[in-house]
Image (cartoon, grey):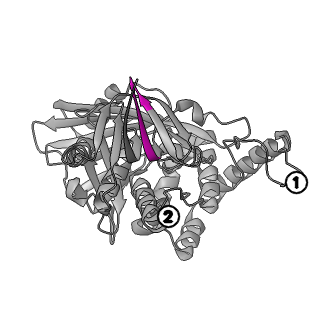
Amino acid sequence: MTTGALYDAVIVGAGVSGLCLARALLEAGEGWSILLVDGAQDDDALRTLSFWTSAPGPLDALVRHRWTRLVIAEASGGARSVTLDSHRYQTLFFADLQRTVKDSLRADPRHRIIDGRATELVTVGDRVRVTVGDEVLQARWAFDSRFRRGTFEVPEGGAQLLWQRFHGLVVCCETDVFDPSSAVFLDFRGDLPAGTAFAYLLPFSPREALAELVSLEPIDAERALRAYLAKVHGVAALEVLDREAGSSPMTEQYFEPFEGDRIRRIGIPAGMLKPSTGYALTRILDDSAAIVRSLRERGHPMVAPPRRRLYRFLDGVFLTLWARWPATMPGVFSAMFTRVSADRVLRFLDERASPWDLLGLIARLPLWPFLRALLSWLARRLRRVAAKPEPAYNDTTMKRTDSHPPADRSP
């Protein structure tokens, strides 16, 4: 093996979180050297990144499309269009983010991109050693974004865990059928499984759009999407320009952000995915900014993400409702956007709500479904507490002696 140079930061994984952190480190202008380990090498793969925001952001130059009106539709056929006040909903393509960040790294000889998978990432003294193929390199700090599915296996009675599967088609039609001014945000129409699947539609032009199917259960997604487009939007003939697919965990379990003194997890392994919505980009950008700020002000990046215990609790109740009584979800989502202003709902979903926003939304949601979900959530947690062994403590330090904390912690 050959030993390579010393870098200020090694980022393992060139996904959304790895690229956003690399971009933030570059934009900081501190001259930090960056090693990016890219195990996927998926530059041409379609991945759309959609999010809402009420303020200018660091990725604004990459945004392809924006909307200020959202459509929410129930399975019964009723659809409501809501106009956003301070927010906008927008989409960018992962390939644009990837190309921009990688071009910036390649333009400076202090940085390096390695195509390959890290087989070892370990702290040795005041350095982190990373092994990629036959090379062993070093860094002062490491950021690990690797997604390990086994991480999300929660114990019986612990946090709720649902898997959100998404399948998207970029389609082009022969005639004008789409309204580019409105994004279909939540649509339960089109003979989709009741409550466990919904569609959304992001029109890029009157003839081109991204149609996405989100489901909690396996489904013939392309067939369902074609049927949805035909029945709901009257699309008689279409051409598929591109496809995307993936899955993500929806769970309120706690994620430990640190792998020792010099390795910081980022992205999904650090809990950046919003449990009840599956959105992550704005949280990833906030986390990247916090890491850079800590490096600049404290000389280290080992800052923990906000715990937000109240939102973890609310997410747990929400996911319990979705898991046990999915047929209620179309009505719940409809009530959220019809009884409360859309901007207030988006602030709540983004965990930026004021106490007044929070109280106003809770007061207007249907009581019985959430009360039933709350009782189910409490029963589940009590079973977990009853079955959980007491942690071992050292009598002299009064600190836990188990080095690996449980995946799920009480809020």
Is 44 situated above or below 59?
A: above
Residue 345, percent from left and from top: 46, 64
Q: Amino acid at mark 2?
A: Phe
Indicate the secondary structure of the residue bearing disc 1: loop
Residue 402, percent from left and from top: 76, 41
Residue at image coords 27%, 57%: 59
Which mark, by number, is residue 348?
A: 2
Residue 50, percent from left and from top: 33, 50
Q: Amino acid at mark 1?
A: Thr
Q: Which residues are magenta?
A: 131-141
Image-quadrant location for residue 95? top left
Q: Is residue 410 left or right of residue 6?
A: right
Q: Which residue is mark 1?
A: 396
Can residue 132 be found in the magenta stretch? yes
Q: Tell me which numbered mark, 1 or 2, is placed earlier along the sequence.
A: 2
Residue at image coords 45%, 35%: 130
> Is residue 267 something that shows in the picture?
no
CA gap between label 1 and label 2 equals: 44 Å
Location of the C terminus by quadrant is bottom right
Is 25 situated above or below 208?
A: below
Residue at image coords 45%, 57%: 287
